[in-house]
Image (spheres, grey):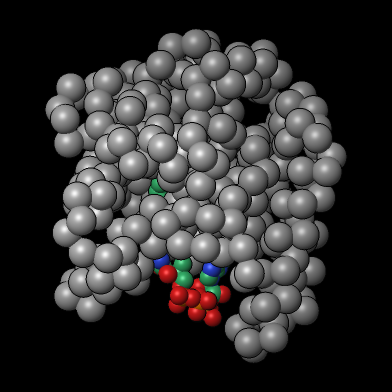
Amino acid sequence: MNFKKIGIVGFGQMGSGIAQVTAAAGYKVVAREEKEELLQKGLKGIEKLLDKAIEKGKATADDKAKVLGNISTTTKLEDLADCDLVIEAVTENLEVKIPIFKALDKACKPETIFASNTSSLSITDMAVETSRRSRFVGLHFFNPVPVMKLVEVVHTVMTDDAAFKDAIAFAESVGKVVVRAKDSCGFVVNLLLVPYLIDAIRWYENGLATKEEIDNAMKLGCAHPMGPLELTDFIGLDTIMYIGEIMFEEFRQPHYAAPPLLKRMVKAGYLGRKSGRGFYDYSKK
Ligand code: CAA
């Protein structure tokens, strides 16, 4: 692997986290968003995290300058033309992702490896839309990216060994531990995590215990950092519902289906931390 320049499409929570760890590892990063204000928001978020780390004595002003100095931003996909690897982290919707990959396929040099950070969509569905099916992988990071150690590196039946090895080497070079997975819906983590979260919502809806009791049970009984309802708020209720729907579509098993309470809360706009309210109220924080 001889990667120098990494493109990141989508500079939201996941994209900016991936940009931060990639830039910290010494790569040049080109981050692309549709609008300039989203690029500024992503950069501000990274700056804030770095300032916090400096306050805690866990980073220096030089570290901050290095990370920010390694990130450039653009609204044009063509500016990613000479990247060695492009990681897509946009909305979880094939109708959004596929046109982006098609445009990147035209713009980027033939050797560029493409990766999607999708949590539940098929890597194969995206790869077949490009002329580089054998150099297309999944690189699934976890939120918050700077904290979570894991990256799932996903291969399809078309991925060639060299590209897969390069993707693994890249993930390790940004300080992550790799779990290799086949292109199967939800890979490893979400396949196991999402039905657990959905089950917790179902039992909460059935009146098993209060939300605090359900969360405390899993935190104190299993040493999880967050209980399932807290974690659903953290990830986003809409995201969990959406991933559950994709899994239900794929496997046709009822335990993946969103319970009525989850659907109603999403409809009401209670999406979790990002909307200020989910199972808990975040409006005053
Ligand atoms: N970005 C970067 N760093 C963050 C952060 C963020 N959003 N939130 C917290 N941190 C850092 C803090 O700066 C702190 O760093 P230091 O130890 O270096 O000081 C550290 O994380 C601990 O933070 P706090 O003390 O503020 O809070 P905490 O101890 O309660 O930890 C947490 C917060 C790390 C989020 C922890 O609660 C946790 O691990 N929760 C579970 C998260 C999880 O399961 N993520 C996976 C979600 S599933 C997914 O992402 C896949 C998908 O496809 C849906």
Instruction: Depth check: give the residue in front, 89 or 156.
Output: 89
Q: Residue furthest front?
A: 207
* Residue 149 rendering spot, x and y as whole percentages: 40, 62
Above or below for 158 versus 57: above
User: Could you tell me which residue is drawn at 79 percent across and 28 percent down?
Assistant: 76
Residue 105: x percent and y percent? Answer: 61, 17
Q: Is residue 279 visible?
A: yes
**Residue 98 occupies which quadrant of the picture?**
top right
At 43% across and 12% down in the image, what residue appears? 128
The residue shown at (25%, 32%) is 257
* The C terminus sits in image quarter: bottom right
Residue nearest the observer in this picture, 58 or 283: 283
Instruction: Residue 227 in the image: state x and y as whole percent.
Output: 31, 65
Task: Please state if 205 lies on the left or on the right of 225 as rendered.
Answer: left
Q: Quadrant of residue 103?
A: top right
Residue at the farthest right position: 36
Q: Residue sitting at 17 percent across and 75 percent down?
A: 221
Judged left or right of residue 211, residue 218 is left
Indicate the quadrant where residue 70 lies: bottom right
Q: Is residue 118 left or right of residue 243?
A: right
Q: Where is residue 258 in the image (x, y as percent from the top left)?
A: 30, 35
